[in-house]
Each structure stands twice: as structure tokens, then as C-alpha cells.
Image (cartoon, grey):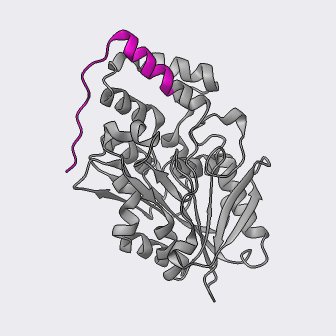
Amino acid sequence: MNEQHPAPALTGEQADRVVQAMADSFGQQLRSPVLHWPSEEDLDYQDVTFPALDGVPLEGWFIPAARSDKLIIANHPMGFSRSGIPSHLEPWRSIWASSGNDIEVNLVPDYKILHDAGYNVLAYDLRNFGLSGAANGGIASSGIFEARDVAGSLAYARSRLDTRDMTIGLFSRCLGCSSTFAAMSQFPEAFDGVRCLVGPQPVTMETILRRRLALLGVPADRIGDLERRIVLRTGIGFAQRAPREWARNVRVPTFLYQVRHDVLTEPGDVQAMFDNIPVGDKELQWIYGTTRRWDGYLEFQRHPEPMLRWFAKHMS
């Protein structure tokens, strides 16, 4: 297990710099570039663009599967693009090294697995990430505005002649999953006919920020100061960034999975989301043997069978 430990406590001035830098990152998000393409996995694909519900242009790939009438719509974690994150390179390495997540995550193999299992795939960049449009001043809203992207991806799938009658499942990762919960709360009608959701590692922002501060050696009592600074940059406090509450509006069969000992979160966070989902057909799978959050994003490539079974069960 790649266990991490909190850094030595910082001085007041050092802690100030860390807290301000973290707040600033919410005011202007760092884009992860699109560095991998479906062609690397010998997949045919189309570059596509479509509007979010509020008109923000979103960029993505459509990967067709011959003679399939099933579609998986995939999005990505915070800070990633549809192709992943180069955390083995700067500046991402310095940002995530304290939590042991200084490795690359390439998400393109996920689309190969889905394609080979018989699914068409629509993978897209959320607003302010990858190659999608800038919106809302570039701020991070933890799913509040990104919900419009989720709803837009569904509208786009239903607008294409070749996909509009397909059976739809969602593969919504981390921020993408929280955004899906938010979209189900804001735009429930958009999910009519959606068969199921697979959601890797949704997270409450206050939870992950508390853990990040501890790993960087910032005293725990600075969390309130961090929130104040984030509000000054974005106008959005922790209470509004509420995937646990949004989960109460999920109405489709849902499979969540999470690294149990993830140093960036607490098990009770995703457990509370799972408990709040008001459907009987749901499952939560824990990943053991690591403390690295990025291993949760690589789990589908390493052990895809449970997720593929979920899709097959609900999309057949």
C-alpha cells in the first residue's frame, strides 16, 4: 500500500501561500491537455462539438461500435480531460505528489474496453477543461454549472440521427459524477430513458480540501479561511457544493466505486452519497490495497468486469 503521511506543519506565512494558491485554483482552473486519442487503441472516431444546456461549446469524441444500439456517455474527474491527466509531468506532478498521485492516468483504454464490449462511446470535456469552452469566468463550481454539460451531452446524443434511439448508460467520473447528481437535481427530465449510471469516486469538495491541507502541513483550522477565500474567488461556499444532497435525486440504477483508504477523501463521504441514493438497485464497491486516488480512476482498466456487468444488466 502506497501510504502517505501529512507533511510537517507549515509556518503561518507558508500556510497562507498554500491556502491562497488553493483558492486561486478555484478561480481559474488548470486545464489538463488532451494528450491521447482513440487512434492509439486502433479505434475509429469522430471529433465532435455540441453545446451545453447554456450554450457553452463542449468538445469530444464519438467512437462508433458497428451494429450496436447502445451508447455510453463518459466524462472525467476534476482537473482531467477526456484523455486523462499527465500527473507525471509538471505542473501537475507538484500539485498531486503529496498524495502519491504523481502518475499519468490515460483514460483512452477505458473507451477501448467499452467499445470492445459492444458500446458506442461519447466522451467529452467538461467546461473549462480539455478543449471545451471557457465558462463562468473559468471557476470551479463542483458540479453546479458542470451539470449543464451533462444535460447537454444527453441532448446531443438524442439529436444525432445515428444515436437518438440508442439505449443510454452513463460513465461519470469524480467531478463528472457529482455533476451528474447535480444535473439529476436541476434537470430531471433530461434523464428520461437513461438506463444506469457507473460513477467512480464522487467527492464532496470540503472533504477533499481538508485532506489536501493536512497532507501539505496546513493546520486544520485553516479550512474556514480557505472557504472564505474560495467564496471571494467564485461566490460559491462549501454548503452549496453538495453531492451528498444531490444524490437524493438519483433515479437510475447506480454503481459507485471508490478507493477505501484514499488519502484525499474519507470513506464516509461516498458512503453517505450511496446511502442517500433513493433507489433499491444500487451497489458500492471498495478498492483495497492502495491509498492513491488515481488507482480508482485506473480500476476500470485493471478490473472492468463488475462495471461491464452493471452496464450489461441494465442496457440489455
Rendered location of residue 185, percent (x, y): 63, 47
| Residue ranking furthest to the top | 12
Tell me: residue 311, above or below residue 27.
Answer: below
Residue 265 visible? The answer is no
Rendered location of residue 295, percent (x, y): 34, 55
Residue 25 visible? The answer is yes
Tell me: residue 79, above or below residue 138.
Answer: below
Total marks shown come to 0
**55 magenta-colored:** no
Residue, x 19% and y 51% (percent of image)? 1
Specify start and end residues of the magenta stretch as a single range: 1-22
Quadrant of residue 246 within the rendered picture: top right
Quadrant where the C terminus is found in the figure: bottom right
Tell me: residue 162, above or below residue 194.
Answer: below
Viewer-side residue, 7 vs 170: 7
In the rendered structure, the answer to whether residue 41 lies left or right of residue 307 reads right
Rendered location of residue 289, percent (x, y): 22, 55
Viewer-side residue, 309 vs 246: 309
Residue, x 33% and y 27% (percent of image)? 216
**7 magenta-colored:** yes
